[in-house]
Amino acid sequence: MEKLRQTLRVRKERAILVAAVFRGKDGPDDLSELTALTESAGAIVVDRFQQKIRKINPGTYIGKGKASQLAGRVKQFNADVVIFDNDLSPGQIRELEEIIGRKVLDRGELILDIFATRAKTKQAKLQVELAQLEYIYPRLTRMWSHLDTLAGAGGATAAGAVGGIGTRGPGEQQLEIDRRLVSKRITEIKRELTNIDKRRIREIDARKGLFKICLVGYTNAGKSTLLNALTDANVVVEDRLFATLDTRTRKWTPAKGVEVLLSDTIGFVRNLPHQLVASFKATLEEAVNADLLLHIIDVSNPDALKQIESVNNVLNEIGCARRPILKVFNKVDIVRKIDALEMLQTLFPDALTISAKTGLGLDDFSKAIAAKYKGTELLLRVLSSQSNGKVQSFLRTYGKILEEQYRDGSVLIDAELGQNQLPALKSLHPEAIEIIEN
C-alpha cells in the first residue's frame, strides 16, 4: 500500500467521493462542497457514495461490507483516489486502502493539499507546511510513508526530505527518525513564523489611530471581488475555493473625511482543519485587531445558513466572536430563490445587500460603513483658542461646522461630529467640549 501514498496531491485523478452520515442526523446532502474542493485540487469526480451509519466502525469507519462495495465501484469507474467527507484515523485509512486498493484521503488532508497548491508568499508556505506536518505527526505510527514525497507548501524543504532518509544509525527505527526530523522541522517553522509575526505586529501597531475593517467569510463568498471594487487592490479573482491565502490591506475612503484600512482574509469552510486555523492565526491577526468585521455572505448559495454558522465557529476559535460584526449579503444579482433571500433578510434584518461584481448597493454600503466609522452623531459646542487651527480643521474634515463665534482670542464652535471621533478631537486639546445633543 505504500505506493498508494506516493503523493498527497490530487492532480487530474479520477475521484470517488464518500460521505458517512449518522442516522437521524443532518449531514451533507449532495456532496456539493466536497465536489468543489476535489475539483479545486485538480481531480475529476466520477462517482459519489453516501452511507447512513449507526456508529463509526473502528476499522473502516463505514464497515467492511460497505468498504467492499466501494472497492467494486472503484473498479467500475476506474477511480484513482477515494476521498471521504469525514475525518479518518490513520488505521482506518490504512485498512480502507488495503480493501479498496486505491489511495484514500479524508477531508482534512484534501483541504491541506489545496492550501499547499495555493500558497504563494513565504509566510503562507510556511503556515501550510506547519499545518501539514502537525496533521501528519500523530499519524506517523501507521502512515509514516506519507513523508516519502511530502514537500509541504515550500517545495523541497526539510519536510520533503524526511521520507527519503539515508541517515539511519545501527538499530535505530525509521519511525523514530521520522518523528525526530518532523519535530525538528516544526520547531524551525514556528521560529521563522514568530519572526514574521513580530514584523506583522509592528505593522499593525503602526496603524493605531486608523479605523480597521476586516473582510471575513466563507471561501468564494466574494471578499476579494469586494476589495477590488472598493480599492485599487487589483487582487486576482477566481471562481474557486481558497483563491486567496494572504491578507491584503488597502486604504479606503467610503465618505468625505472618512479613511479606513480594509483587509481581506483567507476564506473559511465547514470543518476547517484545526491545524490550519492554528497556523493561520497570524494571518488572521487583522481580524482579531479589527474595529469592525464585515462578514461577507454568498446569498446565492443554498447552504448560506450553514456557511454563516461555519464562519461564526472559526471566528469564535480565533477570538473574534465579540468583535463588532456587520453581515453583508453578496451576489444578490444571481440569487435564484427570492424566498430564500427574504428568509435571510428576516433572520438578519441589519445585513447590507450588495453585488460586489456589478456594484449594486455599494453606495448605500459605503454610507453604512461611514456611519459605523463615525458612530452616533453628536451635536457639540467646542471652545478653542483661535491659534489652535487644528481643532477647526479637524471639525471641518471629519464633521460639520454649524456656527462659529469669535471672541477674546477664542472661537466657540457648534458642530456635528461622530461619537467615535471624540477621542481624536480631545487629543487636539481644545479648551472645552460640551455635548449639546446626543
Image (cartoon, grey):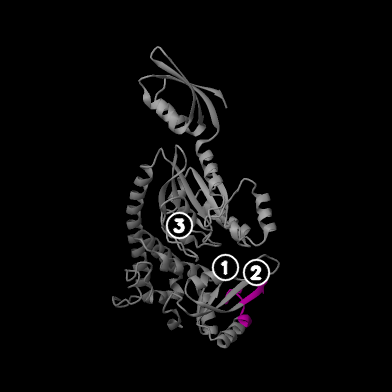
Whether residue 381 appears in magenta in the rendering, the answer is no
Percent across and percent down for residue 385 are 39, 18
- Mark 2 vs mark 3, foreground winner is 2
Characterize the local packing of mark 2: few (<14), some (14-19) or many (20 or more) Cα atoms within 10 angstroms: few
Question: Where is 205 relative to 426, above or below?
Answer: below
Circle 1 packing at 10 Å, graded few (<14), some (14-19), many (20+), is some
Which of discs 1 and 3 lies nearer the camera? The answer is 1
CA gap, disc 1 and disc 3: 23 Å
Q: Going from the N terminus, do you reach mark 2 or mark 3 first?
A: 2
Q: Is residue 421 left or right of residue 337?
A: left
Q: Residue furthest top?
A: 408
Hey, which quadrant is residue 384 in on the image? top left
Q: Amino acid at mark 1?
A: Glu
Residues marked 1 and 3 touching at CB (< 8 Å): no
The residue tagged 2 is 29
Quick one: label 1 or label 3, which is nearer the N terminus?
A: 1
Q: Secondary structure at mark 2?
A: loop
Q: Are marks 2 and 3 in contact (CB under 8 Å)?
A: no
Q: CA distance from mark 2 to mark 1?
A: 10 Å
| Vertical position of residue 341 compared to residue 54: above or below | above
Residue 266 place in picture, x, y as percent: 46, 58
Name which residue lies at 56% across and 45% down: 364
Looking at the picture, which amino acid does disc 2 mark? Asp
Residue extent of the magenta highlight: 49-66
Q: Is residue 422 above or below residue 146?
A: above
Please name the residue shown 64% across and 66% down the image.
27
Q: Which residue is mark 1?
A: 33
Residue 278: assigned label:
3
